[in-house]
Every structure is written in structure tokens, then in C-alpha cells.
Image: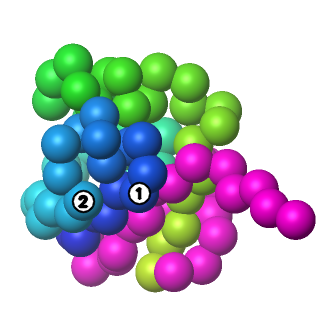
Amino acid sequence: MQIRYFAWLKDHTGCSQETIALPQEVSTIAQLIAHLEGRGAGYQRAFQNREVVRVAINQEFATHDDTINDSDEIGFFPPVTGG
């Protein structure tokens, strides 16, 4: 699975992208976030306020309840604002 981090999520995790093998027990975005938080303090900081973290699966907006598989590309990013 390819994971991409944007803005402050990138700053906290220390990387803009990484490839991981999806653990067998992980089947949703929420479970993926919980798994990533177990990787250390930077990931915990990145996801400390999960409600504001937006996600895309294969470049399409998704929710934390959506299912994922090992061939997906996941993007995590902060809320987007603009004028």
C-alpha cells in the first residue's frame, strides 16, 4: 500500500510518502490510522485530532469508515480552505 502525507501530516510523520504491507487485521481507514499511530510519537501527533484529517483512496475523497486493500493509494491531508 502506498501512503502519502501532506502539509503538517508530512511534518509530523517525517515523510511525504511510504509503502507498507497492509496488516491482515486492517480493513478500514480508521483501522489504518490506529495502526499508524502505533508506529511512534510523530504518527500519534499527526493523527491526534482524527476528525480534521481528510483522506483519499486512489485519489477520491473517502471517509474513515471506508474499506481499503493492499493495492490502494491512501492520501492523508488537512482540511482545505480557500477563497
Residue at position x 38%, y 32% in the image: 46
Q: Which residues are magenta?
A: 59-83
Where residue 68 sits: x, y (%)?
42, 64
Looking at the image, residue 81 sits to the left or right of residue 62; the answer is right
> In the image, what residue type sits under mark 1?
Phe
- Picture quadrant where residue 53 is located: top right
Q: Residue at x 49, y 40 (%)?
A: 30
Q: Does the magenta run of residues contain 67?
A: yes
Residue marked by disc 1: 6
Is residue 72 rendered to the left or right of residue 19? right
Alpha carbon separation for disc pair 2 and 1: 7 Å
Residue 55, picture quadrant: bottom right
Which is nearer the eye, 46 or 7?
Answer: 7
Residue 52 in the image, given as x and y percentages of width and height:
65, 37
What mark, if any, has residue 16 been given in the picture? 2
Amino acid type of the residue tagged 2 in the rendering:
Ser
What residue lies at 44% left-to-right and 30% top-to-bottom?
A: 47
Quarter of the figure with the C terminus: bottom right
Q: Position of residue 13 (x, y in %)?
A: 24, 39
Q: Is residue 41 above or below residue 57?
A: above
Q: Main secondary structure of the magenta part?
A: loop
Q: Residue 44 or 24: which is nearer the viewer?
A: 44
| Residue that appears at 43% across and 51% down | 7
Residue 45 among those drawn in magenta: no
Quadrant of the snapshot with the N terminus: bottom left
